[in-house]
Each structure stands twice: as C-alpha cells, then as structure tokens.
Image: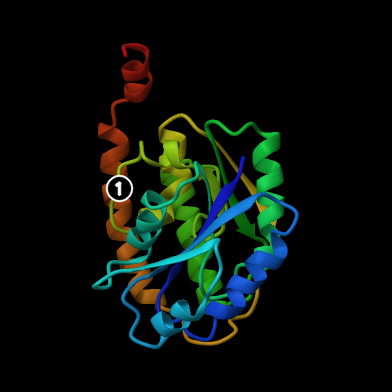
Amino acid sequence: MSFTVIAPIFNEEKNIPILFKEILASCSKVPLSQVIFVNDASKDKSETQLKKIKNTKFKFISHDSTLGQSAAIHTGIINTKNDIIITIDGDLQNDPADIPLLFKKFLELKKNKVFIQGFRHSRKDTISKVIASKIANYIRVLILDDNHPDSGCGIKIFNKSDYMLLPHFKNMHRFMPFLFKMIGCKTHYINVNHRNRHSGVSNYNNLGRALAGIYDLFGIVWLKNRYLNNFHTLVKKNK
C-alpha cells in the first residue's frame, strides 16, 4: 500500500533540494514509492534544480505556461502510479515530518472514502495573512459547512480514485474538504507543523487571494445547489 507525494512548484529554486531530502528522510519508515514535483512554468532556476535530482523515486513534470496550484496538483495526480496521494506545498512551510502522521491516520480510518488535511494550528505567517485566512475560513465554513478550520493547508492525503470523481477547476485546492465531502468521503483534519518560509516570496497577496476566494465561493455555492447527490453511487450500482 505505497503512496505518492506531490508538490506543486513555482519559483522555489532554493527550496527544491531541501524539500526532496526532507521528504525522503521523513518517509524512511513508511511505504513512499514516488515523489512528483510539478513545475508550474517557474521563472527562476527551479527546472535546473529539478533536473539535478537523481533518484529512482523522483520525477518532475513542467507546464509550458503558468496554470496555477490546482492545475499543478492535478498534473501530478494523473501521472502517478499510486492510488494514495499526499500533497505538500513547495515552499517548505509545510513540514514533511508530518507525512507519516497523515499516512498512519489514513490507514486507521480505512483507505476508502477518506480525506484528511492538515490544520496549521500555529501559523508562521504575517499577522495580516493570518487574519485574512481566519476570516476566509470563517466565511467558507459558514456557507459550505465543510467542517474544516484550515482548507488552505497544503498537506493532504486522499485516494486518487476519489479525487477523479471531483469537478476540476482553477483554485479547487482551496475547497478540497467540501468537494470530497460532496462525493461522500469522510473528511478529517489533524494538527500539523507550520514553518517560516526558508527562501523566496509568497506567490499570493491578501487582496488578490480575497478577491479570487469570493469569486470562487460563488461558484462553489452554485455547484453545491446544482450537484446531483449520490450520482456516483447510483452509477456504480448500475454497472
């Protein structure tokens, strides 16, 4: 029951070698069989750093143009050989040491129809970013009732087979708990570590994130009201 770790990469040239080494070190006692870094058309030397990594477990894929974090995750997922997927951000703020914890919890809760996401209970971000995130989470939970305090956390574990049942769209990574709950998965969260950024700069600003989040939320509300409940269950029963 091996798994794949997927990391979206955008302008993280200094973080790439450190992240890969930390993933391997943290997963020495769990069945990690593949690591996929997806380069979302970085403007720095990220691709050069990716080409330097020589390991049988490692592969990278590069987009020809910048498509966004959700697209990068999607590219990694459709190119993996495993059904169990763990995602992690490429900026080193997620801690790879939490990967075994997620995997252990995933196995405890059964491998089918389960989605688990980290909760950064002690954020290492600017005060303005933390406040903006708390407001966004409050509004999201109020409207969507997704039972998750931190849907923006990049470290998650789920089944590829379940993910492929989701509607796929730009910025969907921000609404994963709701989307998995929508298709009948049990959603959970566990406390995870959060670290200061090692190098580089954030790819988001608070205003831009807020405007995109509001726009996306309208779309999610539309989807929630139009989604055919139990559609996938009915299809499977009739095969």
Image quadrant containing the C terminus: top left
User: Most extreme residue toward the top, as rendered?
Assistant: 238
Task: Tell whether 65 sits left or right of 113.
Answer: left
Mark 1, other Cα within 10 Å: few <14 / some 14–19 / many ≥20? some
Residue at point 37%, 13% (across, down): 237
User: Most extreme residue toward the right, as rendered?
Assistant: 29
x and y percent of residue 206 in the render? 41, 75
Residue 224 quadrant:
top left
Front residue of this view, candidates 40 and 123: 40
Task: Tell whether 156 sits left or right of 172.
Answer: right
Front residue of this view, candidates 54 and 203: 54
Front residue of this view, candidates 129 and 56: 56
Q: Does any portion of residue 49 appear in the rendered image?
A: yes
Residue at point 46%, 65% (across, down): 59
Residue 191 quadrant:
bottom right
How many marks can you see?
1
Image quadrant containing the N terminus: top right
Task: Tell whether 213 sits left or right of 114.
Answer: left
Q: In the displayed structure, would residue 9 be above or below residue 223?
A: below
For the residue labelled by badge 1, is the local secondary structure a helix, a strand or a loop? Answer: loop
Q: Does any portion of residue 126 appear in the rendered image?
A: no
Which residue in the protein does label 1 denote?
A: 168
Instruction: Identify the image's colour scheme: rainbow, by chain, secondary structure or one colour.
Output: rainbow
Residue 57 quadrant:
bottom right
Q: In the displayed structure, would residue 176 be above or below residue 66?
A: above
x and y percent of residue 169 in the render? 28, 52
x and y percent of residue 119 in the render? 62, 56
Q: In the displayed structure, would residue 157 be above or below residue 119?
A: above
Q: Amino acid at mark 1?
A: His
Residue at point 46%, 47% (across, down): 81
Residue at point 36%, 49% (across, down): 78
